[in-house]
Amino acid sequence: MSRQELEQLGIKIGLEIHIQLTKLKTKLFCGCNADYRDMPPNTYVCPVCLGLPGSLPSVNKKAVEFAIMLGLALNSKISNKTLFYRKNYFYPDMPKNFQISQYNKAGGVPIALGGQMILKFKEYDKRINITRLQLEEDPGRISYDGTILSSPIAYIDYNRAGITLIEVVTEPDFETPEEARIFLQKLRSIVEHLGIADLSLEGSMRCDANISLYGKNRVEIKNISSYKDVQAALNAEIIRQKNIYKHGGEIKQETRHWDSDKKRTFTLRTKEEEQDYRYFPEPDLLPIEISSEMITSIEENMPELPDDRINRFIKEYKLPRYDAEVLVITKSLADFYEDVVKKYQKPKEVSNWIMSDLMRHLNTLNIEINDSKICADDFIELLNLIDKGTISGKLAKRILQLMMESGKKPMEIAKEKGLLRINDLKKIQEFINKVFNTQPKAVSDAKKDPKAIHFLVGQVMKLSNGRCDPQITNKLIKEALNKI
Amino acid sequence: MIRHYHTIRDLIAEYKSGNKTVEDTIIETFDRIDKVENKVNAFILTLKNEAIQRAKELDKTLKKSGRKTKGKLFGIPIAIKDNICFKNYPTTCASKMLENYIPPYNATVIKKLLDEGAIIVGKTNMDEFAMGTTCESSYFGVTHNPWALDRVPGGSSGGSGAALASGEVPLALGSDTGGSIRCPASFSGVVGLKATYGLVSRYGLIAYACSLEQIGPMATNVSDCKDIFDVIVGNDPMDSTTISKEEMEQYLKKSFKDFPNSKGKFTFGIPKELLGEGIDPEVKKSVWDAIKLLEDLGGSYEEISIPSIDYSIACYYIIAMAEASSNLARFDGIRYGFRSEDKGNWNEVFANNRLAFGKEVRRRIMLGTYALSAGYYDMYYLKALKLRTLLIQEFEKHLKKFSFLICPTMPILPFKLGEAVNDPLTMYLADICTVPINITGLPALSIPCGFSQGLPIGLQIIGNYYEEYKIFQIADLYEKNAHTKNTFPKI
Ligand SMILES: [Zn+2]
């Protein structure tokens, strides 16, 4: 659907994003190691995160600091006193059968309130208002043998229980799914620039969305796992709702589940089945006082944020705004760019290479620069090889692809695959002779019409797999034609 | 009978002089336990072999060190309420739910006791999950009052109170959420303190209502009570609600030179709400006798009014039950605790397992759930919190003026067994003098002040925040002059 079409639907979307602060060494309320991924089940646990009788939580101060950083980056107002609340519901992934979270009602004060992010599009700028930021603990994970219905056993792993989550809640300010995607992308870049999380880790960023059309009932969508998914999920839901309205139906207020395999949403529970979480202040934790001195000192030590980095790229590397924005989409890509530019001082050329070929390969492989096998030094070597004429620009593109797939150095690939440029006159002459022998008609055409020389050059390049130096080839062919 | 010394300090002195070994004490302790336990039922678990083993080790270190003891509780037997986690031994909360639960860690207070040389001889009976005033709701049977075996010992730390009164142990730990230390201290004729909220770590105390409760000392005299308190008090990084290290240092340095003043005079207040209507005449008489004695000792009193006390029972039960409904949610039988047949969906499995809770526990969970539900939260919980603020203001006003406040600990004499158990409202109302202390977080001590029909009566001394040592001072003075120290029933 085009933007105009979407506008007519009166779409309102709000997001609730859960971000694991993966750069914390320990969990939110205990000293357990927070780097739980790939560990054997129930090994990173203690009486506190298992909710054993008598255990008590104590707040990870670094988590509070990280949350303040994100609040400042989103221009939120940091609360000078913030409270934890208990959210009560029974589910076996929660060892205490309540989650220690924060709340904005019943006297609750989340760690940060308000804030905004400006999204830049070609035709317009869009301001998205932030409602609040809150800290909470992640539950454990349940898995089954097969499906939940057929499995005789449920396996519960509490390694994840107690991991720090920060929840970012936005106002329903998004009017298109694309805006939601761009927001998440930018949020991710901010989080990574702050150094508070690595969101390339599986399950480290989860999103719920609420969406309504024509100002009517709101539907909540759960289980959106990434910014790539958000657009698909919202599009699917818009089409569903649009069709129902088109046939005179009504949308019920409900919670739906996004199935990323089937690419559609399913009813999870209706409004009547919504839980009463019985929020109340967590009596085991005192309110956290956040002094203005603490906020100032965090503010003074804030790392460079994506918007500042974009401006710096424009200024320092004389890049067009578009280039800068694309490069800063993820921190890792921007870091890669700067690592290359530091040693290879042709910023625009590097930008072109990254934005075209490198990013295309990343997209095809569906990975991020961090997960690819290429490193900045090898990439620099590749560019140097082109400059020195050791390989052609065209072949360099193939070599780059192979580098990303294999992790080998460019020279190694070039030698292995025989992709080095041929500058040797004798060798080029041999290719020319072969072409002249097999294509007498083209040779006689070229003798009459100089424009037909291009065909011969092309034939030589084809025969040499593009390795012959095109200028030398051109020159030698002209000489050869003169001799005939 | 183990009682041939006055205080645990005397006992430690005997170890040092070589008159007595720690092993002797432990053997005497278990002889006494073996003799009276079938009448009293104070313990859920006794640890004879472990205690004797530890006694032998302590005797060895004593010998090696040239009879120098390390530790304020060196070689002293102590009983622990069964809602405080003792590593590798069952900690049941007197519930079928936790009948087989073995904690993998020690409560902070247990570590402190062990570090000072105490010997844990067993885990004492209590009301299930500390919810009760009579010690009758235990899954492991009722505890009997050593002064009258057909009476309750008070609750919820009834086992600790009875173990002290019957001379089984000289020291015990209890926990006090709404009077659970002071009520059994009063009913069983011993001394018990509920300290200022935040002075004693709750880490390892299985929670009933976390914003109200403190672990606290119980003993047969003020000096012993103070000695355990000295050991368990302190900041704990594992319990965020304990006061900070710096504040703790200040606290321990604090002295009360102005009390009594240079002329030996002091003042105290008597809240008329706690010594008027609804107080048993026998209890009243005993407390007035105590007031007279305090006057003779240099005190002068004024009757005062704390009007919000009238609402404190409602306020207390709303807060306590609301917190309990959440605190006890974790007992679903999935990770530990009673496990019924795994049948049906998650909620059905939970519901089946949670049938292991007794009647009173279920009642409080349900009422607490109700009080926190949408639409009722403002009406009940938030109102209760407002009343809490009001009550604090009213108490503080008087505690600024007076050295302390005096009232009965319990408004009645100990219930007969079975008398209150089916009448929850009567039972709740009996907490009128104790719950305001938990709501406000103030410290209060219960000390024996007399008898009626052979049943003990307790005097409650309420101090200002962080004035436990002042309370000990006056309690000590009273005890010396009232001759209530180490009084035991014939059993
Ligand atoms: Zn842990």
Image: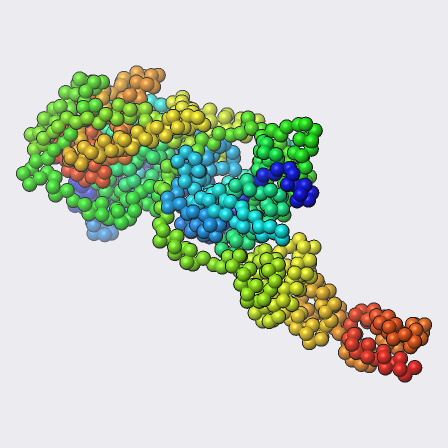
Answer with left or right where residue B262 lies relative to residue B47: left
Answer with left or right where residue A132 lies relative to residue B248: right
Q: Position of residue A208 (x, y in %)?
A: 56, 40
Toward the viewer: A194 or A216? A216
Toward the viewer: A250 or A24? A250
When the figure is inspected, residue B243 is found, relative to residue B311, above or below; the finding is below
Q: Residue at x 55, y 54 (%)?
A: A189
Answer with left or right where residue B428 lies relative to residue A201: left
Q: Residue at x 41, y 28 (%)?
A: B377
The answer to which image quadrant residue A341 occupies is bottom right
When the figure is inspected, residue B102 is found, relative to residue A391, above or below; the finding is above
Quadrant in which the C terminus of chain B appears: top left
Toward the viewer: B40 or B248? B248
Answer with left or right where residue A387 lies relative to residue A112: right
Q: Residue at x 17, y 17 (%)?
A: B281
Question: Looking at the image, can residue B187 be seen?
Answer: no
When the figure is inspected, residue B480 is found, relative to residue B410, above or below; the finding is below
Toward the viewer: B7 or B449? B449
Q: Position of residue B170 (x, y in %)?
A: 23, 34
The answer to which image quadrant residue A47 occupies is top left
Q: Residue at x 37, y 44 (%)?
A: A81
